Image: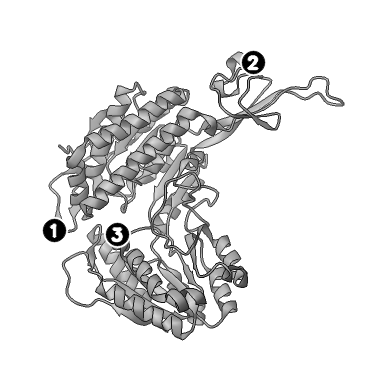
Amino acid sequence: MISGQSFIGNSASAQGPITFHTFNPKTNTENPWLFHEANDEEIEKAVQLAREAFQVFQNIPGKKKALFLRTIADEMEGLGDDLIQVYMTESGLPEGRAKGERGRTMGQLRMFADLVEQGDWVEASIDTAIPDRSPIPKVDIRKMLHPLGPIVVFGSSNFPFAYSTAGGDTASALAAGCPVIVKSHPMHAGTGELVATAILKAAKDTGMPNGVFSNLNSNSYHVGKALVQHPGVKGVGFTGSIAGGTALFKMAAEREEPIPVFAEMGSVNPVVALPSALEKNGDHWAEQLANSITLGVGQFCTCPGLILGLKSPSLEAFAQALGKLLGEKEPGVMLHPNIYQNFKKGKEKLSAQTGTSVVADITEDVPPNVAQQRLLMVDGDTFLANPTLHQEVFGPFSIIVQADDAAELETIVHELEGQLTGTILGEEKELKDYSGVVESLKDRVGRLIFNGVPTGVEVCPSMVHGGPFPASTDSRFTAVGIHAIKRWVRPVAYQSWPDTELPDALKNGNPLGISRLLNGDSSDKSI
C-alpha cells in the first residue's frame, strides 16, 4: 500500500540512497515502511516539471480548477479507513481527531473550489481611458491578481492532513494557479504518500498538466534547502518552529531573486484574565483553560501558554483551581519522541528560571512519549526581566503571570513578542477600563478573542491565522480561510491592451460575470 517513493509529477521515484522510517509514538517502535529521500536529480526534475506545468496551469479556467480541487477532496475521502489507520499509526492521534482533521482538509479544498469557480477573488479593476482629458489624456489601465509560479509547501508535524500534503497551503496555492511541490514531513511520510496519490489521481482525471503537483520525501535539511534556493521556485509555505521558519526565510531572502516565505511559527497565545472573570467565573475559566491547554496534548499552535492577571486572592484561587484540573487530566502521547524530548527540555528550562513556582505537575511514571502537563506561576517584574519565560513550550504547559497593577499588566502585554492570538476574559464594560491593555494586545496578535479560548480555528473568510513575527513572517496575510490565496499571487496591470488579448476577468464584455471595480465603482456589468 505504501511504496516509500517520492512522486515527481505523475511518476513515482526512489533514486536516493538515504532511507528512513516513520515512528509510532504509542508503541514506541518504528513503522515498517521504508522511505527514500529525494536526491538532487529528483529535486531538479520536480522543479522543472512544475515550471512547465505553470505555463498551462496559470491559465486554466476557474471552473476547471474548482473541479480539480473538489476531485482531490473526493479522492482523499475515497482512501477511507486505510488513510485513517496510517495517520493514527504515524502520529499517535486518536481516530476521532484523524477523521475530524480529514473533514477539515476536504472542507478547505471545497472552499477554495467555490472561491475560484465564482471568480471575484482576482480583484479585477478597470479604469477606462479618457483620451480628451486635459491637460494629459488618461490611458486605459486594468489590473488583476496573477499567480506567482511554483510553490514549495513544507508539511507540518502536528497536522498531518490540514497543514500538510493537501492542507491549506497546498489548496490555496493550487487554487491560485500555482503548481505545488510538497516537502513531505518525515514524521508522517506514509500519510503524505497516500494523500499525494489522491492529488495525482485527481490531477490526471481532471486533465491537469504533469508537474502540477509533486511530493518529495525527506528526513534531512538538504531537500528543503535545495528547493527554497532553486531559481524555479517562486514562493514557500511553512508551518513549524521559529528556528525552521526563520532559516527558510533567510535562505529565500539571500537568493539572487528573493522570494516570499509565508511561515506560521511560534506563539504562546496570551490570555488576559480581567478581575471580573476571576472574581465571578474563576472556576469556569479554569475548566475551559485546562481543556484548552491539554487539547491534542498541547500540540496546537494556538495552545494558551501564557495567562496574565492582576495579583489578588481571586487570581490565586483561579491558579489553584486550574492546577487541580490539570493534575486530574490524563497525560497523552505526543507526536514523536523528538517532540516529547523537546517538550521535556522546554518545561524544565522554564521551570528552572529564578522566581518561578510550580502550581501543578504530574510526576508519576508514564509510558514512553507521554507528556506530563505542568503549570507555573511567576510575578510580573520577573517575567518582564527574563525573556526566556516568553518562549513557547510546545505541549501541555502554561505560565500564570501576576501583574502588580493595571500599568504593569499593560507593560507586560506591550513587551510580548508577536502572537497568533490574544484573549481577553472579563465583562464588556471592563474593556474601556483596560483599553491600554486591549490596544497593546491588538498590536501583538492576528486574532483578538473575547471570552473564549484560542484553540479551535474556524475555517471561514473572516479568520486570521497569522500575526507579527515570530507568529508569522508576514503579518499582512492569513494561513487559514479564503484570503490565504493572496499569498501566492501578485497584481499585474495591463495598459492600453487590446480587449481580445486581455484575460477574461478584464475584458469589456465581462464573460465571467464577476464583480469588478469599474472606474472606482463595484459592478458586474460589461463596458
Is tag 2's residue or tag 3's residue first in the polypeptide sequence? 3
User: Residue reaching furthest bottom?
Assistant: 313
Horizontal and vertical percent position of residue 221: 33, 49
Q: Name the residue under label 2.
A: 498
From the viewer's perspective, is residue 153 above or below residue 63?
below
Task: Return the residue nearer the eye: 455 or 85.
Answer: 455
**Residue type highlighted by circle 3:** Gly
CB atoms at circles 1 and 2 under 8 Å apart?
A: no
Is tag 1's residue or tag 2's residue first in the polypeptide sequence? 1
Label 2: which secondary element: loop
Task: Return the residue nearer the eye: 84 or 355.
Answer: 84
Gap between marks 2 and 3 measured at Cα: 56 Å
Q: In which quarter of the image is residue 314?
A: bottom left
Left or right placement of residue 347 versus residue 148 in this view: left
CB atoms at circles 3 and 1 under 8 Å apart?
A: no
Is tag 3's residue or tag 1's residue first in the polypeptide sequence? 1
Horizontal and vertical percent position of residue 355: 42, 84
Horizontal and vertical percent position of residue 197: 25, 33
Residue at 51 percent of width and 77 percent of height: 275
Gap between marks 1 and 2 measured at Cα: 65 Å
Residue at 38 percent of width and 35 percent of height: 110
- In the rendered structure, find residue 296 and report the number of the disc placed on it: 3
Q: Name the residue under label 1.
A: 27
**Residue type highlighted by circle 1:** Thr
Gap between marks 3 and 1 measured at Cα: 18 Å
Q: Nearer the viewer, mark 2 or mark 3?
A: 3
From the viewer's perspective, is residue 271 above or below residue 106?
below
Task: Return the residue nearer the eye: 209 or 456.
Answer: 456
